[in-house]
Amino acid sequence: MATGKSQVFTVGVDFGGTNLRVAAYTPDCGILHSILLPTRLQAGPDAVVDDMCLAVQQLLDHFSPAHSLAGIGVGSPGPLELPAGRLHHPPNLPGWDGYHLLAEMEKRLRRPVAIEGDANVAVLAEYALGLGKELGIDSLCMLTLGTGVGNGIILDGKLWHGATGMGGEAGHMTIDPDGPICGCGSNGCLEVCASATAVANAAEHMIAEGNAHGLARLKNGLVPLTALDVANAARRGDPDAQYIYSETGRALGVGLAGLVNILNLPLYVVGGGVAESWDLLKPALFEELERRSYVYALTAPGRPAASGMPGGGTRVMPAKLGPDAGLLGACILPLYQAKAASTNSILLPLGRE
């Protein structure tokens, strides 16, 4: 560490299908400054990476004089091959198949870069700084409901990667075999049933059928509706918007029931933009969870088999860190990779050693 520099900082990149968020971070102060940019997918991968690296370099130039850089972290959509950092047929990134994201970023920045799937960095943040820390839990599963549906899993303090870094693709579990086609090529994936894109598409479909007059008025001509528009309409009492969120919660409950039955973890976190409408999702979600997961029915807080479980039972909760989970996770990723490399042990959150 250079003399005269009081503390380390990192730069994190939250690479989303709609926006790029880049931030400088210190463990003591949290996010120091962030930059928000649109993700210029139509301009191609190189243009997007150029935007990313330019924002990273701006933060490096600004904060390096007073801080020592501890690393650069990136959360990327998947499927992401690790440790190569290469994308494979990402459903929400057309034209990125086979793209060496890690190598391209390191070439431009001329520095090492730590990379993980976007849901992995989000679950890392919830584990280290959010609900995992609050409840004292070392194993959890997270679903992120954004442009797509991401999934991150931490088992006994370690990120679960699978054999090639592609473990945790619950967004592509089948919810409805006869449902809409997904970008991955399958039908009825959780991603096409419970993402922000799915909510908006459901509204557009109902409008096109001529049965959703309130949503049609809200659309106001050719302006596309967003998941937030539909949520606001649901809270104002629009029955079609309420139906869409009920069906979204139902699909989410089906997916979570499968995860609970398979994993039997103490905590399942739902994050991303759609999770901001937890009040609208919750009734149908828990109805399906109770009906379809006998493990949840036995181990939910207060149930017979919940005694002695970490956190007091199987909990399904909205993310504590909200939409910042992915960005915070990217920021702390270099610190965790450095700790894992030096100790060859579990990734203990700061302050929990």
Image (cartoon, rainbow, N blue to C red):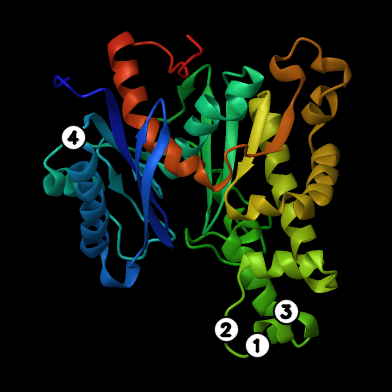
Residue at the spot x=62%, y=53% of the render? 190
Q: Which residue is mark 3?
A: 206
Amino acid carrying mark 4 in the image:
Pro
Rounded to the nearest angstrom, the CA distance separating label 2 from label 1 is 6 Å
**Does residue 100 appear anywhere in the picture?**
no
Camera-side mark, 4 or 3: 4
Relative placement, left or right, of 121 versus 207 is: left
Asked if labels 1 and 4 touch by Cβ distance under 8 angstroms, the answer is: no
Rounded to the nearest angstrom, the CA distance separating label 4 from label 3 is 48 Å
Q: Which residue is mark 2?
A: 223
Quadrant of the rendered image containing residue 5: top left
Badge 2 or badge 4: first in the primary sequence: 4
> What x and y, as percent, mark residue 243?
81, 66
Relative placement, left or right, of 217 versus 350 is: right
Amino acid carrying mark 3 in the image:
Met
Asked if labels 3 and 1 touch by Cβ distance under 8 angstroms, the answer is: no
Residue nearest the observer in this picture, 265 or 217: 217
Quarter that holds the N terminus = top left
Q: Which residue is mark 1?
A: 220
